[in-house]
Amino acid sequence: MKRLSYPFTASQIRDARLGEIVSLSGKVFTGRDRLHQFLAEGGRPPLDLRDGAMFHCGPVTAREGGAWAIRAAGPTTSSRQEPYMPSIIERLQIRVIIGKGGMGDGTRRACVKHGCIYVQAIGGAAVLLAGSIQSVVGVHFLREFGEAEALWELAVEDLRGIVTIDTRGRCLHENIRTVSRKALDRML
Amino acid sequence: MRESHWEKNLFDLIRRTSTDLPMDVEAALRRALRMERLGGRPRWVLSTILRNVELARKKDAPLCQDTGTLRFYFRVPVGFDTNALVAVVRAAVSKATRCGYLRQNTVDPVFGCSFPTNIAHGSPVFDFQQGGRKSVDVRLVMNGGGCENVGGQYALPDCDLAAGRNLEGARRCILDSVWKAQGQGCAPGVLGVCIGGDRVTGHEHAKEQFLRKIGDSSSIRAVARLESRMMKEIGQMGIGPMGLGGRSTVLGVKIGSLSCLPASFFVSVSHMCWAFRRRGMVLGPEGGVHRWLY
């Protein structure tokens, strides 16, 4: 298992191999459909996202004694961000995407060109992933986008996932798709 | 109707459904884990899932942050006041959202606004049937968006799949649907399938299959055979947990059928993720819990 920590520099992530389990520590940002559309259309991020990790996630939160607590925070389907992701990687220099289900060819190419990896977190494992969140550092666009769609700035420790798109452009999702297609064709 | 009594118990149903995976599903996940190679990636994925299941139960927290469409199935005595039930369910859903057992998970597609209590046009979803019993049987299924998005409906015959209007045609549709979904629906989950019906009833009946227990099989022998064949064949595709490769892609395939028009032959496939949240209870006429289901 490889340990990566914020800021996720190009040299750190270049060594992350396809299919390898990685453990992320430091800071991650959450973002969903509305944030991605906003950023891709040239919207100004409320903080510097360079060398950051974008977690495709809309958490379940609660206010506990005046502070935010994250009760559940699993990944959401990443493919919905495919139209926006390549330009966000390029413009804002995001180095790690955390999500589920993988992404398309545009993102894969942007990962190669600008040095970014895709980490598949375990979909639905929301309590376990919330357990790796140490604290809420900040929240942006809460009023505009709502709780699930807001940009949450989270301090994390040992958030785990599997590298499924690497900086060389290899894609585990695509490999499985090809292998399973062959098996399907034999059965049809 | 003593509303507070009903509301308290329905709140408890929501809380438990969101946080406590049913035993039959958990047992199926453990069987799936044993099928995967020691030290391999699919085994890591499944053990992570099972740790999450245990932790959610222990911490009394939602298993998955997408607390899904809330679908309530009520079987009530003849003449029972279902409007009153709708009112108490709405109150219980609002409370469960405030308490963090449900995410603010309902948005308006036209205006883009969010409904803070999950009460809106079309949310939650109700299904009522009247029966001869004196008790009220209520079941809740939470169906997240990831798996809902990969469901689909086929109108047979389908030339691309060489799928005709028979069980073999249905088999081809199911295989195709699983392949297209890959890991997007958070495998390994359960497939609910309806052969026949129309555009609406087909999907409804496919979803009703989620009320069945993982271990059961169809009472129609040919359909039961198809269910077990699908389990085997889907496993052979190698898609695996979360679509990262492996043997366990589904925990169950549940197939139902409805009569249809001579001109129509639909196969509706609904995907349920591994976070298969389904609970139920039998309530007395005063709203007291007789027993839990599942």
Image: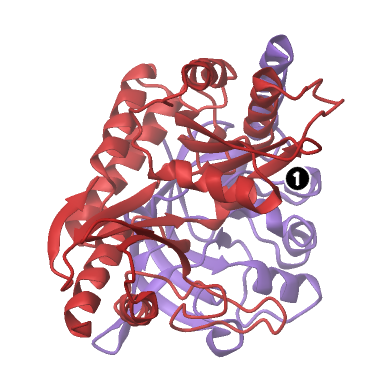
Where A97 falls versus A146 (above or below)? above
Whole-percent x, y for residue B66 in the image: 46, 61
Q: Quadrant of residue B252?
A: top left
Q: Which one is in front, A95 or A19?
A: A19
What colouring method underlies this structural image?
A: by chain
In the image, the chain rendered in purple is: A
Tell me what residue is drawn at x 33 percent, y 28 percent: B215
Q: Which chain carries label 1?
A: A
In this view, the residue in front, A68 or B142, is B142
From the viewer's perspective, tell me whether residue B186 is left or right of residue B285: right
Q: Name the residue under label 1.
A: A104
Q: Which of B206 and A68 is in front in this view?
A: B206
- Supply the letter of whichever chain is red: B
Q: Where does the C terminus of chain B fall, quadrant-wise?
A: top left
Label 1 is placed on what type of residue? Gly
- Please provide percent x and percent y for residue B226: 54, 18
Of all residues, the one furthest to the right in this rendering is: B159
